Amino acid sequence: MAMVAVGGSIGTGLLLGSAAAIEVAGPSVILSFMLAGFINWTVTMALGELSSKHPAAGSFGVYADLYLNQWAGFVSRAGYWAAICLSVGASLVASATYMGFWLPAVPPLFWVALFSLLLGLVNLRSVHEYGRFEYWFSMVKLATMLAFIAIGGSLLLSGHVAPQYTTHGGFFPNGPVASLLALTFALYTFGGVEIVAITTGESRSAAEVPRAVLYTFGILTVVYLGAVVVLVGVMPWDHAGVSESPFVTVFRMVKIPAAGAFMNFVILTAALSGANANLYAGSRMLFSLARDGWAPAKLGQLNAAGSPKLALLASSYGIVVALVAETWAPKNAFVYILSAALFGLMLSWLTSLAAHVSFRRQATEEELRSLPMRSRLGMWGSVLGFTLVTVAILRTWWDSQVNLVSGVAYLALFSAAYAVMRKLRRPSTILP
């Protein structure tokens, strides 16, 4: 469960998107990632406690149904499904770009189509075979990131590289507020932790949930904070351009042979691993909607391997979007798809935190003691997390008209879909 969530989290957001965050905040981006890590901790604790009580593929959508209302349950699941499937498309667009490093003459559309076919075949296998594939996919980028942290840390501690934390304008070169402006980028890199709750629907027992949840958070926190601390310590912040990954830049600085080709391979693996995990999460979310009566019943069917075949095919719509975007707007496809996906991700976090607050208000002490995992932050941790995520969403709306329009359109579209589906809804086949 943990490595599937890690696979969905450590992707192009960190390996390429970190450059954008560093450009905004400079070395103070460390504070951005620390705050994002805390927000992620509140979400992790809320999801961990709820998923240990209600293991389900619908995850936060099921929790919203139980502890909030049907509108929140439907909108959060449908919105997340739409967003996570768009992320699949974004990752495949990025993967095609990385293949151009070695084979620039091959059209990007070829790579998008080829990778789409391969990931579809992997996701049609049993969850055990899928998990084994994703485990090794995730291990490549995780091992690389840990090696990067170790190499960069040793360079700083040994004095071979002068620390760059206060050079080129100081720790706050763009002002103290800049670290808050970069928070959106940092939050997006943490996106994917909610996947561990989705995988609980296929776990052997609720007792496995606590270790998977804490393991996921621990890995992501060490990797993200460690990588960012090393990045801005080894490399001047104003050298973190968007022409190549800052990780490639650092490996070039320490004269590692073929650093560009190696990191391009790692970033390609990260993008494909992220797409693979997101396709898994999207298909299970749509499967949950179908089983709960909010989508056509056929989408809730499983093939012989136990995979939701039709839900998987429907969840591939983000790949079609990627193909269209690659054809008509290849330069802007990655940015626009990610902007549209961000709100759906944040909405799942808001729902999780709100549902946890409601659950805590209803739960008895005896019920809490019986849980396999109990949140160390309690109800007020989720209240604080909900407030911080809301502020982050409003900030993105203030900064970008694209984010504002896409966020409002998301809510309007899925609220209208809810009104229609409520009249057509079948009885649920999911038990709490």
Image (cartoon, rainbow, N blue to C red):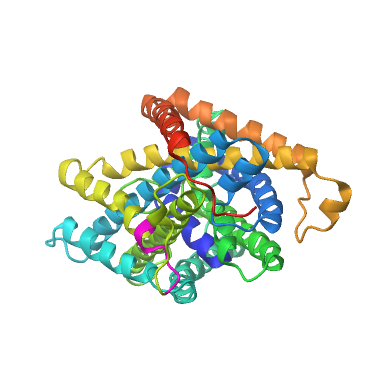
Within the magenta stretch, is there residue 125? no
Give 314 or 102, whichever is nearer the viewer: 314
Residue pictured at 49% horizontal, 49% vertical: 189
Question: Is 419 left or right of 208, judged from the image as shown?
Answer: left
For residue 61, what is the image quadrant?
top right
Within the magenta stretch, is there residue 310? yes
Give 29 or 366, whichever is nearer the viewer: 366
Asked whether residue 159 is in view, the answer is: no
Above or below 135: residue 13: above
Give 212 or 76, whichever is nearer the viewer: 76
Where residue 297 appears, as percent x and y from the top left, is 41, 53
Quarter of the image where the N terminus is located: bottom right
The segment highlighted magenta reads 305-311
The single residue placed furthest to the left in the displayed view is 105
Where residue 185 appears, as percent x and y from the top left, is 48, 41
Where residue 340 appears, as percent x and y from the top left, is 38, 37
Residue pictured at 48% horizontal, 71% vertical: 127
Question: Is 311 left or right of 165, judged from the image as shown?
Answer: left
Where residue 41 appears, as percent x and y from the top left, is 67, 48
Residue pictured at 63% horizontal, 71% vertical: 204
Question: Is 312 left or right of 285, judged from the image as shown?
Answer: left
